[in-house]
Image: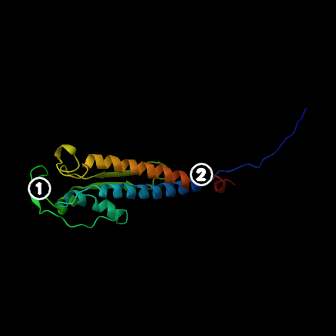
Amino acid sequence: MLNFQLSLPDLVFDKPKFTKTMDKIIGQVLRESTREWLRVLLSHVPVETGMARATLIPIGQYLNNVGGLLFTPTRKPYYSNLEGGIQDIGLGLERQEFKIVDTAIGSWKYTVFWDSGTHHYWENEFYRGDALPGEAAEIEAEGVFFLYFFQTIDRRLPPLGPFLS
């Protein structure tokens, strides 16, 4: 019969350091994924009066100005009963809303929220143009967001060794 005893040193896990590192990595990947989402969305948003595309300018600036945010409207502004105002860049900027929470130490709740606040492009029943309708474009962009996020986070997760002592 074989009998032996082995003593291992007590391992201590540095949870605060691990949490801070994970929060930093998740925040970076979240912003990168949102940039990819925005790039896909911008490739589908038409520029007529500029209202629909203008709803993406503030989030693009927050994400370090993703390309495609500078544009010139191809149609003169006009009053839209549907939108309840003059359809132009200013109304698009005024109506949009976004929020990104990319650091959430302790809660692990990260947020990417964007709402255009417009109807004429983002809701299929109101759009009559040639570009991919806003709802379909959002679905495509969301798929790119999640694909990028999970592929990237998988490569960036740190090994546990540095957090053990």
Query: Looking at the picture, which amino acid does disc 2 mark?
Result: Lys
Q: Position of residue 139 (x, y in %)?
A: 33, 46
The residue drawn where x is 30% and y is 49% is: 137
Quadrant placement of the C terminus: bottom right
Left or right, 122 with reference to 104: left
Residue farthest to the front?
Answer: 130
Quarter of the rendering containing residue 64: bottom left
Query: Looking at the picture, which amino acid does disc 1 mark?
Result: Gly
Left or right, 114 with reference to 148: left
The CA span between labels 2 and 1 is 53 Å
Q: Where is mark 2, residue-wise?
A: 15
Residue farthest to the right?
Answer: 1
At label 2, counting other C-alpha atoms closer than 10 Å, the crowd grade (few under 14, some 14-19, many 20 or more) is few
Q: Secondary structure at mark 1?
A: strand
Q: Position of residue 11 (x, y in %)?
A: 71, 49
Q: Where is mark 1, residue-wise?
A: 85
Q: Which residue is at the front of the view, 30 or 108?
A: 30
The residue drawn where x is 29% and y is 46% is: 136
Quarter of the rendering containing residue 48: bottom left
Q: Earlier in the sequence, mark 2 or mark 1?
A: 2
At label 1, counting other C-alpha atoms closer than 10 Å, the crowd grade (few under 14, some 14-19, many 20 or more) is few
Q: How is the image coloured?
A: rainbow
Quarter of the rendering containing residue 43: bottom left
**Which label number is shown at residue 94?**
none
Q: Secondary structure at mark 2?
A: helix
Q: Position of residue 162 (x, y in %)?
A: 65, 57
